Image (spheres, grey):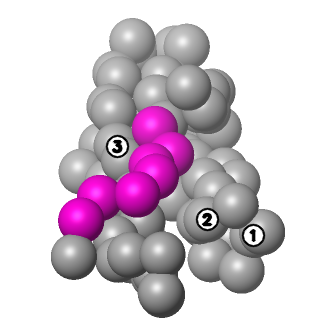
Amino acid sequence: MGFIDSNDFTVTCEKCGATENTRVVQRGSSFGAHWSDPPALLKFESVWDSEARFGPQLTSAKCRKCGIDAKVDEK
């Protein structure tokens, strides 16, 4: 069972400059695959859409230090 696909995200607080990178991966084979559970972020409260067509998507994040909405970028 190997690594098939991944989604990478970078979360940044534009107020305090906190940043965090995270990844969800799809594992399996051509006979069947599954996505990893979305990881918990340390610096941000996160909201994930686990039912997204192309794997879990980080839909929003809030800085734990500042309490403001953070910028979410998918790579």
Kindly identify which residue carries mark 3. 22
In the displayed structure, 4 sits above or below 68; it is below
In front of the other: 75 or 43: 75
Crowd tier of the residue under label 2, counting other residues whose Cα lies within 10 Å: few below 14, some 14–19, many 20 or above = many
In front of the other: 47 or 24: 24
Crowd tier of the residue under label 1, counting other residues whose Cα lies within 10 Å: few below 14, some 14–19, many 20 or above = few
Kindly identify which residue carries mark 1. 52
Residue type highlighted by circle 3: Thr
Residue occupying image coordinates x 24% and y 51%: 42
Residue occupying image coordinates x 36% and y 47%: 23
Q: Are marks 2 and 1 in contact (CB under 8 Å)?
A: yes
Could you tell me residue 18's position as x and y percent? 34, 21
Residue occupying image coordinates x 35% and y 23%: 19
Look at the image and give the residue range highlighted in magenta: 2-8
Q: Which mark is residue 55?
A: 2
Q: Classify mark 1: helix, strand or loop.
A: loop
Left-right relation of 1 to 11:
left
How much space separates mark 3 and mark 1, taking CA atoms? 17 Å
